[in-house]
Each structure stands twice: as C-alpha cells, then as structure tokens.
C-alpha cells in the first residue's frame, strides 16, 4: 500500500509512515544547521529528486537501461561495430545519469545518506558499474543496475524487506535440509555404491558420498528421479521405498516449509503496514474532529459576542442576555453546537 501522495505541483507528500522509513527523503533539522553546503542548494536538490516527474523518469531510465543491456547481447548488435558503439554510448549516458542522481542524493542528505540502506545499495551499484565499465568480464555485472528499481517502487521495497526478516528461519530450514541430504546420502551410498561398478547404472550416482548428495539434490528438484529409481530397482525391487520416503521428506515437506516461512513473513509485513496506516489515519481523524470542535466553540463564542453587542445597542433586557450566556456555557459543557 502506498503511503505517499502528490501535491498540485507534483511534489511528494510524505506522511508519518513514509518519513519513518530509512530511505525517506526527509532530513533532520539539526543536520541542516550543521551542513557544509548551502541550504538552498540542498533544498533545490531535494525538491528535484522528490518531484513526481523525476521519480517516474528514473524508473523509466532503469527499465530502458535494462532492456538496452539485454538487447546488446543479440548477434545483430555484436556483429555490427557501429550499432555496438551506439549501444555502448547509450549505456554510458545512462550510467552518467545514475551517477548524477546519486550525487544529488549525496548533496541533499550528506552523511545521512549512509544511514539509508537502499541509497547505500544504489551508491555501491553505481560505483561497481564505473569500476567494471572498462572490463569485458566486469561489464557483465552491469545488469545489477536493474536492482535500482527496488528502491523506487515502494511495494518492491516492502517485499524485499519482508524477505529479509525471514532470513533466520530460512537459514534454519536450510540447515535442516543439509542434514536431511547428509543422512540420506550416507544411507544411499552404503546401499547402492557398487551398482555403477557392476554395470547396473549408467552414471556413478551413488559411488561416493559427494556424488550421492548431488544426485539427491537433483532428485529433490524432481529431475529424472523416476529413471534413477527404476535402474536401482532392477537389482533391489524394494528400492522404491527409500526413494519415495526421501521425495516426501524433502520435496513435499522441507521445501514447502520454506515456502510457508516466506509467505508468512510477507503476509506479516503487509499486515504491519496496513495496521500502521490505519493508526495514522485514525490519529489524523481524531485531530480533525478536535479541530472541528474547537472551531465550533469559537464560532459559538463569536456569535455570543455579536449578540451581546447587538443587545447593548438595542437596550435588550439583561435577563435575555444572561439566559443566552447560560445556554452557551451549557452547550460548551455538553459538546453541542448551534
């Protein structure tokens, strides 16, 4: 769920949920006073970076650069030096624009940029792109620039953040999977290690422990597991039992457990975002209601003053004036308005 909007001039309006984010484009007031750069320059950079057109233009530039690097690998580009030179020039222009953007972010935030993880990630990608720009092997990693779009789209950022929160549980699932592979690897190696030497298998699937664990990993992905099982069953007819147990343990239990952990983390992250947005909305609604009540009381008092002035000019009886004042006080105590 987006927690930002745009004003009439296209500048991003950031609420409490947005400003609490590590990558939010707000600066502490204390840092403005201690800045080494003119405040006007910093504010102009911030206004430009946070403009709706700038945000959309950066996303479009990332997508264009990613498509450019993909098309560059086709033969009609590689075989034509003129087209290849054009593609390289366009790639250099895109990299220069990314550098200008991150440079303006550094001017706007100064050292606070290194407190925003996503901006540090953007800075590292741009730096690695420049370092590998002149090397054929290193240039293959330019496609990592497409990851810059994660910082520009809030839903992607929240998704990656949710995946980061479930890393410890995924690590635990991975350890359990390795233990399972090791246990079954020892069992299968002990039972079937001589089948390849005897000519019953076309590959040394279970000749050594490392071969066995690789074969089990292949079978866990459901790749050719039935063919391997049938070859083993020519010697051991009941061999399907440990193979089926292994498939059930890994593919249908461990992998689904990992998927469940990730799904739970993503669902929890979005529920947390929605609850925070609801809290912000309710607090804003309560403040609006208080403001309306205060305004109504001020209108009532103003009406009372006008009536009192009119009564004084017209010589109205003081009893009517006092009754009107009592009615105003009663309405203020009960919260009623005219």
Image (cartoon, grey):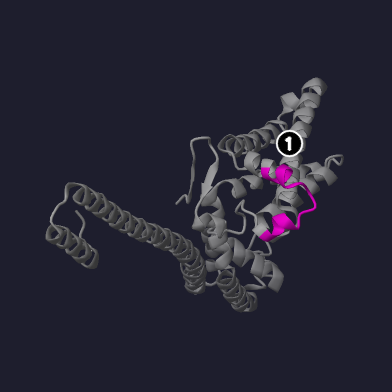
Place residue 137 in its image quadrant.
top right
| Residue 151 drawn at (x, y percent) | 61, 49
Residue furthest to the right in view is 134
> What residue is shown with label 1?
97
Is 330 on the left-hand or right-hand side of 33? left
Magenta run includes residue 83: no
Magenta residues, start to end: 30-43
| Closer to us: 249 or 111 | 111
Is 52 on the left-hand or right-hand side of 104? left
| Residue 197 drawn at (x, y percent) | 70, 68
Against 104, residue 324 (above or below) is below
| Closer to us: 197 or 272 | 272
Q: Residue at x 78, y 33 (%)?
A: 92
Q: Residue at x 31, y 55 (%)?
A: 298
Regarding mark 1 in the picture, which secondary structure is present there? Answer: helix
Q: Residue at x 62, y 73 (%)?
A: 178
Q: Principal SS element in the magenta part?
A: helix
Q: Residue at x 49, y 40 (%)?
A: 7
| Residue 219 drawn at (x, y percent) | 56, 62
């Amino acid at each position: 769920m987006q927690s930002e909007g745009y004003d009439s001039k296209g500048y991003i309006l950031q609420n409490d949920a947005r400003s609490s984010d590590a990558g939010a484009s707000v600066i502490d007031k204390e840092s403005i006073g201690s800045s080494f750069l003119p405040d006007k320059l910093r504010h102009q950079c911030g206004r430009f970076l946070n403009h709706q057109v700038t945000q959309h233009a950066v996303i479009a530039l990332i997508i264009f650069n990613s498509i450019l690097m993909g098309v560059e690998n086709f033969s009609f580009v590689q075989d034509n030096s003129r087209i290849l030179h054009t593609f390289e020039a366009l790639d250099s222009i895109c990299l220069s624009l990314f550098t200008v953007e991150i440079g303006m972010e550094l001017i706007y935030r100064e050292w606070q940029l290194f407190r925003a993880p996503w901006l540090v990630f953007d800075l590292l990608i741009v730096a690695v792109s420049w370092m590998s720009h002149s090397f054929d092997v290193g240039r293959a990693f330019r496609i990592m620039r497409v990851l810059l779009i994660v910082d520009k789209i809030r839903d992607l950022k929240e998704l990656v953040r949710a995946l980061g929160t479930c890393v410890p549980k995924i690590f635990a699932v991975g350890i359990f999977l390795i233990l399972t592979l090791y246990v079954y690897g020892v069992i299968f190696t002990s039972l079937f290690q001589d089948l390849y030497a005897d000519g019953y298998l076309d590959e040394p699937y279970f000749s050594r422990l490392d071969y066995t664990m690789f074969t089990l990993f292949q079978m866990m992905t459901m790749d050719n597991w039935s063919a391997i099982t049938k070859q083993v069953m020519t010697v051991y007819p009941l061999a399907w039992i440990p193979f089926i147990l292994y498939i059930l343990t890994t593919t249908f239990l461990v992998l689904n457990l990992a998927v469940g952990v990730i799904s739970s983390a993503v669902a929890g992250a979005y529920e947390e975002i929605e609850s925070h947005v609801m809290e912000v909305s309710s607090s804003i609604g309560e403040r609006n209601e208080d403001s309306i009540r205060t305004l109504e009381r001020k209108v009532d008092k103003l009406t009372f003053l006008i009536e009192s002035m009119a009564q004084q000019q017209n010589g109205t009886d003081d009893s009517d004036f006092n009754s009107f004042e009592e009615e105003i006080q009663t309405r203020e105590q009960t919260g009623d308005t005219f």
